Image (spheres, rainbow, N blue to C red):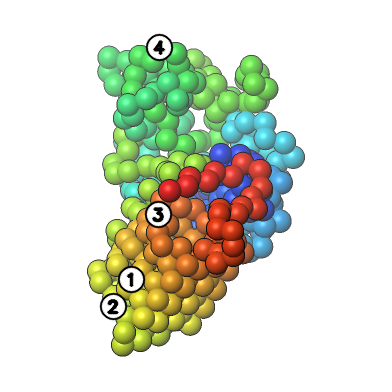
């Protein structure tokens, strides 16, 4: 079995961060989102992985490399234009060959991982093979992961028949007949290649994976489903990204590899990486302080991840993600924030007093 991770797209909902960085490389608990998907693949025994890249392909290749650091072998597949998820399958056909594969959206975060998802599909196929002697059961050609949601109008939705089998997929229905949303993790046999070649672009000009799966159903293929166990978050916006950061930080264990002076206080589960310095400060976990970062006369509150080579001085930060080389100085309280790379947030002593901003397109500033 192979893996296909989709890491294209412009990430418009995370601008301005994604003006200069791939959305899949924005960190959650100081690790790029994309890395979680790769690690989940490897944990499920999938080590041949293709990554679909778009305009940020060079940055993704630099971050991931050849995959050896993950115990994987990575093949990069360039998508010149974002023409849909089914188009990703189409252009990856030479890489995928005749193998089954898991397709995973690179900005998804799943609590449950992929091991159970893959093993249940393989078990179903084995059971189907055992029963096929009397022609009773067909092999599944695909498996989708579903999650109960309160607002199914925003998602692709699966409808089940009276026997609990997937009968229909509808993209963002106005009047949904189900609250089961497609999570963005799919398992396919080679049958999907015929499907993606058979469908037509949707009204928005894309080859939709929901149409391809519906083609399988309409042509007599069996599509099985799993219902999500645990949480799932699409990190394409700031608030879900901060929520993902919170969820992951809740699982960490204390590790102090950096310097913490005697005037500082560490409470709860906190990671201070090697090369970091905590001076006359309080860190209230769960929180992470990246390598080379200095926290001086400051408070870092729960659910905060500060990346490498940052400076926090005379400030309070809580429930935030701070990217590398950021400086936060003299800020009495910063919360629920995503602070980009090489940024400076300072309280100026310049007169006349006032708020002075230099911000780019698509920024959001919420003043006290």
From the image, tell me which residue sits under label 2: 265
- Vertical order, 310 against 78 (above or below): below
Marks 4/1 in contact by CB < 8 Å: the verdict is: no
Q: Nearer the viewer, residue 251 or 117?
A: 251
Label whose residue precedes the other's in the sequence (4 or 1): 4
Near mark 3 (Cα within 10 A), the count class, few <14, some 14-19 or many ≥20, is: few
Report helix, strand or loop for mark 4: loop
Question: Few, some or many C-alpha atoms within 10 Å of disc 2 (few <14, some 14-19, many ≥20)?
Answer: some
Please tell me whether mark 1 sits on a helix, a strand or a loop. Answer: strand
**2 or 1: tag closer to the N-terminus:** 2
Q: Which secondary structure lies at badge 2?
A: strand
Give percent across and percent down for residue 288: 39, 68
The numbered disc on residue 283 is 1
In the rendered structure, find residue 335 and report the number of the disc placed on it. Answer: 3
Q: In this view of the protein, which residue sits in the foreground, 208 or 367?
A: 367
Whether the residues at callouts 4 and 2 have beta carbons within 8 Å, the answer is: no
| Residue at point 42%, 57% (across, down) | 334
> Residue 144: which quarter of the image?
top left
Which of discs 4 and 2 lies nearer the camera? The answer is 2
Q: Residue furthest bottom?
A: 262
Q: Distance between the residues labelled 4 and 3?
A: 37 Å
Measured Cα–Cα span from mark 3 to mark 2: 20 Å
Residue 164 at least partly seen: yes
Distance from disc 2 to disc 1, alpha carbons, whole Å, reads 6 Å
Q: In this view, does 269 lie to the left or right of 351?
A: left
What mark, if any, has residue 175 been given in the picture? 4
Query: Is residue 368 placed above or below 87 in the rendered structure?
Result: below
Comes first in the chain, label 3 or label 2: 2
Nearest to N terminus: mark 4 or mark 2:
4
Q: Residue at x 31, y 87 (%)?
A: 262
């Amino acid at each position: 079995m192979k893996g296909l991770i989709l890491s294209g797209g412009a990430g418009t909902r995370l601008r301005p961060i994604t003006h200069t960085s791939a959305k899949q490389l924005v960190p959650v608990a100081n690790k790029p989102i994309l890395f979680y998907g790769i690690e989940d693949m490897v944990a499920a025994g999938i080590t041949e992985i293709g990554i679909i890249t778009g305009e940020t392909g060079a940055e993704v290749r630099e971050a991931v490399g050849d995959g050896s650091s993950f115990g994987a072998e990575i093949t990069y597949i360039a998508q010149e234009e974002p023409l849909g998820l089914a188009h990703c399958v189409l252009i990856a056909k030479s890489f995928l060959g005749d193998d089954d594969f898991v397709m995973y959206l690179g900005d998804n975060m799943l609590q449950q991982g992929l091991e159970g998802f893959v093993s249940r599909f393989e078990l179903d196929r084995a059971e189907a093979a055992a029963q096929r002697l009397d022609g009773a059961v067909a092999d599944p050609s695909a498996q989708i992961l579903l999650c109960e949601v309160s607002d199914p109008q925003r998602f692709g939705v699966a409808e089940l028949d009276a026997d609990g089998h997937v009968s229909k997929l509808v993209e963002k229905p106005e009047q949904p007949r189900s609250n089961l949303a497609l999570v963005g993790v799919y398992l396919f046999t080679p049958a999907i290649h015929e499907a993606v070649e058979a469908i037509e672009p949707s009204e928005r000009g894309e080859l939709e994976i929901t149409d391809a799966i519906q083609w399988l159903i309409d042509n007599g293929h069996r599509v099985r489903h799993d219902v999500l166990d645990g949480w799932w978050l699409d990190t394409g916006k700031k608030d879900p990204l901060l929520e993902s950061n919170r969820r992951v930080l809740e699982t960490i264990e204390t590790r102090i590899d950096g310097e913490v002076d005697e005037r500082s206080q560490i409470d709860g589960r906190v990671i201070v990486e090697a090369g970091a310095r905590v001076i006359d400060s309080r860190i209230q976990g769960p929180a992470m302080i990246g390598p080379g970062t200095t926290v001086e006369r400051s408070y870092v509150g729960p659910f905060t991840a500060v990346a490498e080579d940052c400076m926090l001085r005379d400030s309070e930060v809580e429930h935030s993600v701070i990217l590398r080389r950021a400086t936060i100085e003299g800020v009495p309280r910063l919360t629920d924030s995503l602070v980009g790379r090489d940024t400076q947030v300072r309280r100026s002593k310049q007169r006349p007093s006032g708020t002075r901003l230099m911000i780019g397109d698509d920024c959001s500033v919420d003043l006290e």
